[in-house]
Amino acid sequence: MNTIEENTNVTSLRIGSGVIKNIGKDAGRFVVATMEIPWKLTTKLLGAEARKVVIIESIEESWLNEQLSDLPGCDCIIGIGGGQAIDAGKYFAWKLEIPFISIPTIMSVNAFVTPAAGIRRNHQVVYLGEVSPNPLIIDYDIIRSAPRELNIAGIGDLLSIHTASFDWEHAQSKGMSEYPFSSSITRKASEILGELYPHIPAIRNAENEGLKAIALGYMKMNTICLPLGHFRVEEGSEHYLFYELEERLQQPFIHGNIVGLGIYLMSRLQRNDSNGITEIMDEVGLGYHPNAMGIKKEDLLRSLLNLNNFVKNKHKLWYTCINDVPISREWAMNATENLRF
Ligand SMILES: [Zn+2]
């Protein structure tokens, strides 16, 4: 078992092929939070019987609290699955003040390394609690059995460093940064990208080395961001375009893919090496083109033209290039010219 370097939220890590095996034997009395497909995949591998298995049907706080009131006594919670199962497991562990074992079965989102449980309260996202997975278990064989495009999408929230860090620096240059700006921090964040790029072919093919590169990238991000108390180096205008589209179209998206579309367009608005980052997204096979997400050209154009208005009406959003670089219909037509609809 690896002990993790300073400040990351993960207390210990088991990473490799087959590392999930018999994890239940050392877990004492445990409850599993999972979903049907990941549970089928892992149920025989744990080596011990769960006291209860909660199939997560919702991450609404009220639903989760109902499940909590029905849980048998246990020593730890094991979360097995994608973002929602992991978040539900974190929530249970936090509420019960017991250890949490995190077993992501897909790389698509970073819920498995972040401390707070992202759940819904009356359909609005809220982040609650602080939980450190101990251990985090990354079993390559399990993760590889998930659809490849979903594992590739895991790279979206790392590539967003490219546009988000630029936004932070831009905000600083306009005297509008919400947090003390530090170029040593943006430099550390861009080192994550530098370390990721040699592994692009392995990420594309869901090879061990590629899955590890994404997991380590997320953990390094935490090492940088948790002490700061914000994720400014990773979240900026590329996410804001996604928020606008989500509100406009009221449909779910694969997070990394829609963030990829944001990176594509906002790196163009920023004039920030858009060709370089687009090449990386193409090489890794990220599904950022609108046709893959069912986004029509007219909707995307409307979204872009409304973006400035959108961020100004959301007071919590940070200052980015959207605030002061004008988006005209002509610019939007040009920027979307090579996207596939
Ligand atoms: Zn994100």
Image (cartoon, grey):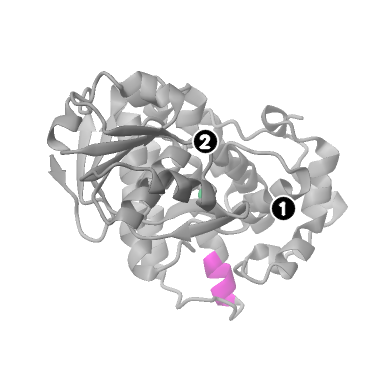
Question: Of the residues under marks 1 and 2, which one precedes in the sequence?
Answer: 2
* As drawn, 210 above or below 176: above
Which secondary structure is most common in the magenta stretch? Answer: helix
Question: Would you identify the image quadrant in which residue 338 lies?
Answer: top right
Q: Pointer 2: what residue?
A: 57
Kindly state the secondary structure of the residue where label 1 is placed. helix
Foreground: 130 or 12? 130
Q: Quick one: label 1, few (<14), some, or many (20+) residues within 10 Å? A: some
Foreground: 170 or 60? 60
Left or right placement of residue 208 versus residue 323 in this view? left
Q: Give the residue type that dot 1 points to.
A: Glu
Rendered residue at 48%/56% (across/down): 234
* As drawn, 251 above or below 316: above
Asked whether mark 1 and ligand 1 are closer than 8 Å, the reply comes as no
Rendered residue at 54%/61% (across/down): 166
Magenta-tinted stretch: 168-173
